[in-house]
Structure formats: C-alpha cells, structure tokens
Image (cartoon, helix red, strand yellow):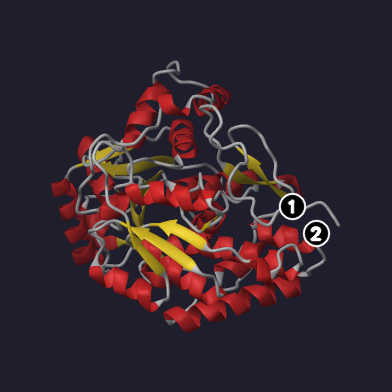
Amino acid sequence: MSRPASVIRCAGCGYQASPDNPYPFRCPRAGTGDVDHVMARVLDTARLSFPDGRETNPFLRYRGLLHSYHVALARDLPDAGYCELVSALDGAVARVDGHGFKITPLFRSDALSEALEFTAGGGVWVKDETGNVSGSHKGRHLMGVLLHLAVMERTGLLRPADRRELAISSCGNAALAAAVAARAGGWRLTVLVPPDAYPAVVERLRALRANVVVCRREPGVPGDPAYLRLRELLGQGALPFTTQGNENGLCIEGGETLGYELVTGLRERGGGLDHLIIQVGGGALASACIQALREAADLGALARLPRIHTVQTFGAHPLERAWELARAQLPDNPSPDGVRAAMVEAAAHRSLYMWPWEEEPKSVATGILDDETYDWRAVVEGMLLTGGRPLVVSEDLLVEANQLAADATGIAVDPTGSSGLAGLLELRRTGVAAAGERVGVLFTGARR
C-alpha cells in the first residue's frame, strides 16, 4: 500500500488517524482536558496540483484534493474505480432528491453592485447554493463523508454488515441534506430536532425515512439540547453524520469543494476578491472556505487570500466573543507565525474562548443560531491572518438584506442564506469595503 497524499490529524493535540481507520471523524482524546480536539484533513501540497478538469460534478473535478481519493489510490482502487463510485452515489442522490451535485453559479451581480454603490472595477460577486442538493450547501459537507464511507467499504476496510446508525442534530438544511445523503447511501439516520422545528421539514425528513427525535431544553442546562442528545448517541456508538467539524472533521472537506469552485470561477474571470463574507452558525462553511482558499494559494491557484469576515446575529454571537478574546492576546500587527502560535495556545484552553451562549438564541436567520461555534478555532485564525473581522448584525439588517437579495438577483434565498449580504451592508456603511473593491457573498439556502 502506498502512502496517501493526505492525512487526518487532530489540530488540538496532533493525534494522526491511520489511513485504514474507517471512522477518523473525532479525536479519541476528545473530552480530555480543555483542549479543542478537532480532526482535520491535511494535504501534502508538494505532491499535488490544483485541478483544472472540466467535470460538472465537483466531487469528480476536485477529487485529487479529497482524502477519500488518496485512500482509494493507496488501497489500489484506481482513478476510474473512484470515479465510478462517485457517479454511482451521485446517481443515487439524484434519484432521492431530483438531481445530483454540480458546479454552482458564481456571478457579478450588477444590480447589487449598483444598489451598494460599487464602481465598475469593484462589485458584489454572488455564489448561489440555493439550487444545490436539498436546497443548500450542506449536502456538500455530507457527501464528502458519504464518499469516505463508500471508499472504506469498496476497499474492504469496512464491512457493509457492520454499518452503524448515523446521527445529526439539526432542524433545517443540514438535517435535510443528511437525510438525502443517508437515504442515497442506504444508511439509517436519526435526526435530533428542537420542538419548534418547521413541520414541513419534519415531514420531509420522515418521508426520507429518517428517525426524527424531538429534544426539549431543560431549565438550567446550557447548550443546544439536540446537540447534547447527539453527544449521548455518539457515546452509544452512532456515527456523526453532521456538519459540526468537532464531531466529524471530514465534513469540512466536502464543503471545501465550494471554495475550490470559487477559486476556479475567479481564475476564469481574471480576478480575485478583496473581501469574502461568510455567515456562521456552527462554523463548518467558514472553516471549509478558509481551508480551501489556503490550499489553493499553497498550490499556486490563488495569488492572495481575501479578507475573510463572518456574520452572526445579536441573538447569538459566540464567535465574535472568541475573536475578541483571541485578538486581545496579540500585539498590534502580529506576524502570521504569531497568530498561529496564539491559536495553538487558545486551542489548549478552549473554555476560555468558546462556551454555550447564555440565553436561548432567536433570529429570523434560524440557521446561524448555534449556541456554540463548533469550528471556532479555524475561523478565528482565518480572520486574524487575513485582516478580517466578525460582524454582528441586527434583525432589521437581516430582513433588509434578504429583501434586497431577492429583489436584485431574483434568487429565492432564505434569511439565513442571505445573511452574508447583511454583513456586506454593514461593511459598506462603515467604509471597510471600498467602492472599488471586489466582495464575495454566499447565498447558501433556498427559501422554503
């Protein structure tokens, strides 16, 4: 067996999973001490190049950057066999959801650029994920996990008879994406939801044969009750089929395909971005985009990283709190090495930076109301390294941004999915984003 060009390693303690491990999702040392144990895929970029294929399926186009691909090659499953596996799974997804995965649109919105008074040299670039599998970007994260499990089975490292139950805590797009992917792959899935989950979402989950369990808050118990129940199920042997990177580090990799697409699209149009604004709940999307852009830069496909900003609501903004605490430990104009060293230290004392929001969060942007930002460390580091910042926006601004998004682009995006645009409105009003700069936003979820 050859050595794979990628490994799965804990960013908190350095533990490295064996390439033969079918479940390298969570660090076995998690829960010990106060360390932020998060498994992360690390590429050996010296052995790789940025893909320039023309496949319309992102998991085919960017397969050379996926851990499951490198494990497949190392276990003598050739490129053609891996592509066959991807195509078969994608076909199963299409039979469940009506269509499979494809490259999603990236375009300069002239109407938004004009409304926000950008000049011809600048403007607003929109990456539209509302037409993605199950109506959001979440399916990308979980397709990456499903591919990993399929490779483990195809190469004999996991027996189909030994399949465990999958579990996720979510009441929206992540749950729907998990249910579609699990049904396509033939896996059993339990979805943990709050009492106020949308009835239409619950109905769709049950139609996809997911086991739906309602989790209620208990007085005096901090944290999301669905997430707390998820931790119980994982302790009993269920597999984390979730978009929370601390529970399943491989979910980040599938989401990276969106960042790779962004890089490819910008290269084809002859330019980069000055700012990228990403809405944050649990933080997996921001973490995935940051890692994808870094890897693209390491591979020579991106000249420079944009300033990366994040958006949360006044209803709950634990990421902004963690960023403020981390920044307070740094001198003015810290070096990149200084930032990385400070974040290593922060990861060794997680409870000083990240803890559950003290009150039950509420917002029109329900998808970014996580009590904790589970992937906080990677996102805080990304903002500090690029000169970005966390933005905390009001409900009025979220509503204004959603209406503007629909009016200017005609895209039926929901308030969560357009909340990055609310962050851009804030950046324009404060002058952080200049009229001649290029700014990227992600429309991540369809209005249902």
Which sits in the foreground, 344 or 271? 344
Q: Quadrant of the C terminus?
A: bottom left
Q: Is residue 355 above or below residue 247?
A: above
Amino acid tagged 2:
Ala
Is 232 left, or right, of 437 in this rendering?
A: right
| Residue at x 60%, y 47% (from the top left corner) | 295
**Mark 1 or mark 2: which is in front?**
1
Amino acid tagged 1:
Pro
Which sits in the foreground, 144 or 398? 144
> Are the two marked residues, 1 and 2, in contact with CB atoms closer than 8 angstroms?
yes
Where disc 1 sits, the SS reads: loop
| Residue at x 50%, y 59% (from the top left corner) | 241
**Mark 1 / mark 2, whichever is N-terminal:** 1
Image position, residue 253 (x, y; %): 56, 54
Is 22 left, or right, of 333 in this rendering?
A: right
Give the crowd class for mark 1: few <14, some 14-19, many >=20 residues within 10 Å: many
- Label 1 belongs to which residue? 19
Which sits in the foreground, 215 or 428? 215
Image position, residue 383 (x, y; %): 43, 35
Q: Quadrant of the N terminus?
A: bottom right
Where disc 2 sits, the SS reads: helix
Name, please, the residue furthest toward the right: 1
- Label 2 belongs to which residue? 74
Image position, residue 232 (x, y; %): 46, 49
Q: Is residue 245 above or below residue 71?
A: above
Which sits in the foreground, 177 or 334? 177
Checking the image for residue 151, the label placed there is none
- The answer to whether any part of residue 214 appears in the image is yes
Image position, residue 127 (x, y; %): 39, 61
